[in-house]
Image (cartoon, helix red, strand yellow):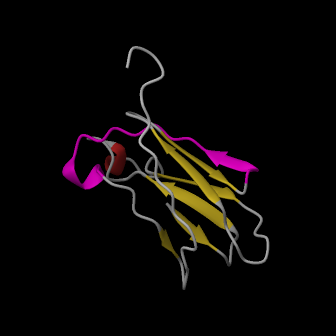
Amino acid sequence: MSSNKNDKSFCVDRTSSGAVSSLFAGLGVQCGAVTLTNDVLTLDVFLGTSMVEADAGGHKSITPRVYPARDESLGLPLFADGAATVRSLKVWAMKPAFGG
């Protein structure tokens, strides 16, 4: 996931996800506009077995399908264009909604 303060966007990059995401131009990166309050971006991120949901500031959401078939598709890196500070990070392990 990345954020760009200058063009006021946040993106989910899934070019390392699955076997074909990086083979097709435009398939791997999804971006959306976001409004920052006091230059702060609040993200809520939910990971499933085949999807990522990224909610920015409670107003915008990107939910791409992901297929973690390759080693480089595991994990969740955060990065920004320019300097950024992570002020808080909380991680919870989620259980399946059904049959888990």
Q: Position of residue 35 (x, y in %)?
A: 77, 65
**86 or 5: nearer the viewer:** 86
Residue extending farthest top = 99
Q: Residue at x 30, y 42 (%)?
A: 68
**49 or 64: nearer the viewer:** 49
Does the magenta run of residues contain 30? Answer: no
Q: Quadrant of residue 3?
A: bottom right
Q: Residue at x 33, y 46 (%)?
A: 17
Work out whether 32 lies above or below 41.
above
Does the magenta run of residues contain 71? Answer: yes
Q: Is residue 76 left or right of residue 80?
A: left
Q: Position of residue 79 (x, y in %)?
A: 47, 71
Q: Is residue 18 left or right of residue 98?
A: left
Q: How many marks?
A: 0
Q: Residue at x 42, y 30 (%)?
A: 95
Work out whether 100 lies above or below 32.
above
Residue extending farthest left = 71
Predominant SS along the magenta part: loop
Boundaries of the magenta span:
58-74
Residue extending farthest bottom = 83
Q: Quadrant of residue 94?
A: top left
Q: Is residue 37 left or right of residue 75?
A: right
Quadrant position of the C terminus in the picture: top left
Q: Position of residue 60 (x, y in %)?
A: 71, 50
Q: Position of residue 76 (x, y in %)?
A: 39, 56
